[in-house]
Image (spheres, rainbow, N blue to C red):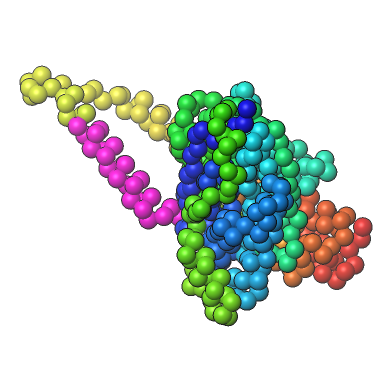
Amino acid sequence: MALRVVEKAALSDVGRARQGNEDSFLERSPLFAVADGMGGARAGEVASGIAVATFDDEPQPDASPEERLAAVARAANDRIYKMAQADASQAGMGTTFTAVLVTGNEVAIGHVGDSRLYRWREGELERLTDDHSLVEEFVRQGKLTPEEAEVHPQRSIITRALGPEPQVEVDTFTYPARAGDVYLACSDGLTGMISEGDVADILRSHETLDSAARALIDAANANGGRDNITVVLFRLDEDPDAADDPDTLGESATQVGISADEVRAAVADAGNGGGTSQRTVPSKTVPADVPTEVPEDEQTMHLRGREATRARRQVTIGTDRPSDPAMSVPPRSPPRRRRSKTLLSALLTLLIVGALLVGIKALIDSRYFVGTNDSGLVTIYNGVPYDLPFGIDLYSEEYVSPVPARTLPGRQRQRILDHQLRSKGDATDLVRQIERGRIQN
């Protein structure tokens, strides 16, 4: 008996650190897709929008499911690349691409980048796609554990996307499906904020996909929301009439970052040599891309929350006090000596904590390491290669070299990406040797 989609849900959220949403998604049974764009001047939104809009002009409608998904990805890559070449403000733009097509008792998958597809089956969560990223390559080579990769400072650097190059390699594969399977396609704004264990717990504890989608978004935001967050969920079940349904990609896509009309206008504008409006959007690949300011609307909500809390406290205090002044008894003050000792202990604690923080900061400031920036250039960082919760980074850019890391031989590239702590002089000497082409293997 054939399977069909019996329940679906999709949500996209800007997150707590971005000013715009560069994600796009498609929710159109039996086809679902997620695209996570990157690039400035709205280029990321354009790229992800093109990725899902290309399904409306499917290049090979009569091919096999895998070939159809690969053809859409390649056609989208060609459009994005040509647009970036025609408009300097969109140079380097690109997008991830993760799409799944349900056909009978199987699901076909097309994948480029680090968005992901998961399968929830019989209480177990399984990832069906491999990230095309720098740290994932290190994991495959045994240089990093999966746990280390999750917190690595270069985890946002992807090695494959639609748009940056004239040709793209698309991963395609097919999995057998079962009744009751739930599939989750998501951008890395979700998996970068919560663990796969958390994802499994949320799917396990929610009866509907709508509530699960909202809970996943909320959990990612609660952990910092450092990127746009997109989740697309669908459930399969047996249907005796499913085999009679035509195998179609539907009529219209659901998009978030940019509308279909805007995509067509952008493509036409690029063909005429025009440009798009300028607006800086944080790059997906910046390792330390965490704004320290809360957006104005969130500041307002936080202020309102504090005012409401203060008002509730005032009401509570007022109702707890006796209404009869004769019954009111002033609180007894503690003995002055006891208060003096408490104050002295608090001051000593603050002094000790302050001294420790100053010492730790001085130690961090004295250390350096070599890595790459968002453009893949060899870079010297001051600090240590770790991120703390709430978007706190323990490193900052000190010097950016003009040398792209991808142009270096494998052993040399590994040497600059091992994030070994060095003195400023050692880090500077290493980068200078790279620039002079005389680095010793």
Answer left or right for 321 relative to 189: left
Q: Residue furthest bottom?
A: 273
Q: Position of residue 181 (x, y in %)?
A: 60, 29
Q: Quadrant of the N terminus?
A: top right
Q: Of residues 296 and 248, which is closer to you in this image?
A: 248
Q: Residue at x 85, y 71 (%)?
A: 436
Question: On screen, 306 above or below 393?
Answer: above
Across and down, in percent, residue 55 comes to 59, 56
Residue found farthest to the top? 327
Tell whether position 293 is magenta: yes
**Residue at image x 62%, y 31%?**
2
Q: Write the residue at 85% across / 66% down.
A: 433
Magenta range? 292-315
Is 307 or 37 nearer to us in this picture?
A: 37
User: x, y (%) of residue 199?
Assistant: 57, 33
* Residue 304 on the magenta segment: yes
List x then y, in percent, for residue 10. Answer: 49, 43
Locate residue 415: give its quadrant. Answer: bottom right
